[in-house]
Image (spheres, helix red, strand yellow):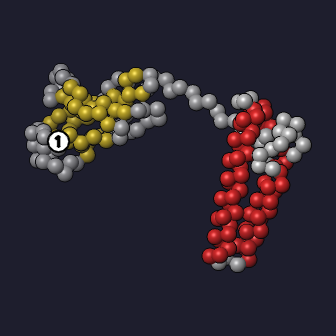
Amino acid sequence: LHDKAEGNPLFPNPVPSQVDLQSAVDDLLAANTAVDSNAGPVEYKARRLAVATLEDLIRQRAGYVQAISAGDASVIESGGFEVRKKPSPVGPLERPTNVVSRLSSFTGGAKVRWQSEYGVDMYHVYMSRTSSPFEYELVGVTTKSSYEMTGLEPGQFYWFAITAIGAAGESSKSEPCHVMAAA
């Protein structure tokens, strides 16, 4: 960052100054040398302070470069910083996979888990008391990749299916998972 701003006409008066930035780098180098030669608590504390000081100056420089650049990627890169990629929208979500039952510790409880996926904001949990045909009803909403239903009839079988909800809407239902409520 120091070298990229040195003599760069795009950054005539860098903040923090080149002298302050170089001084913080020198202080960190000295603190690292002290830790290497005598790894005591005083030396580690001095190094943490030097790191924090340099990080603060780098944040100040990043703000300065951002203000000068007005978002121009080539100006940001000429200041020694990388340009963050713009996030791409997540398209339609795949239906949840690997839906499996887990043992519930509650009498009348049924627990299911599934594979979490990127881009999912939440999941809808559907339950059916029959499989021929499935008559699903929405029984829960969760941001986790598991759900535990309570208050079911102990020893009875139920079928659960999960959908993923994201910016592009709701996925199709997962394969059904056959679960027996804990007795």
Label 1 element class: loop
The foreground one among 63 and 132 is 63
52 on left or right of 4: left
| Residue 143 position by quadrant | top left
Residue 134 at x, y percent in the picture: 20, 23
Residue at 22% in and 48% down: 103
Please give the name of the residue rendered at 57% of the width and 27% of the height, measured from the top-left corner: 88
Q: Is residue 181 left or right of residue 83?
A: left
> Callout 1, which amino acid?
Thr
The residue pinned by badge 1 equals 150
Q: Nearer the viewer, residue 4 or 168?
A: 4
Horizontal side of residue 112 vs 42, given as left or right = left
Residue for point 18% across, 23% down = 135
Question: 168 or 1, which is in the foreground?
Answer: 1
Residues packed near mark 1 inside 10 Å, few (<14), some (14 to 19) or many (20 plus): some
Camera sees residue 174: no
In the image, residue 87 lies at what x, y percent?
Answer: 58, 30
Residue 86 point in image, percent of width and height: 62, 30
Foreground pick, 93 / 144: 144
- Give residue 10's quadrant in the image: top right
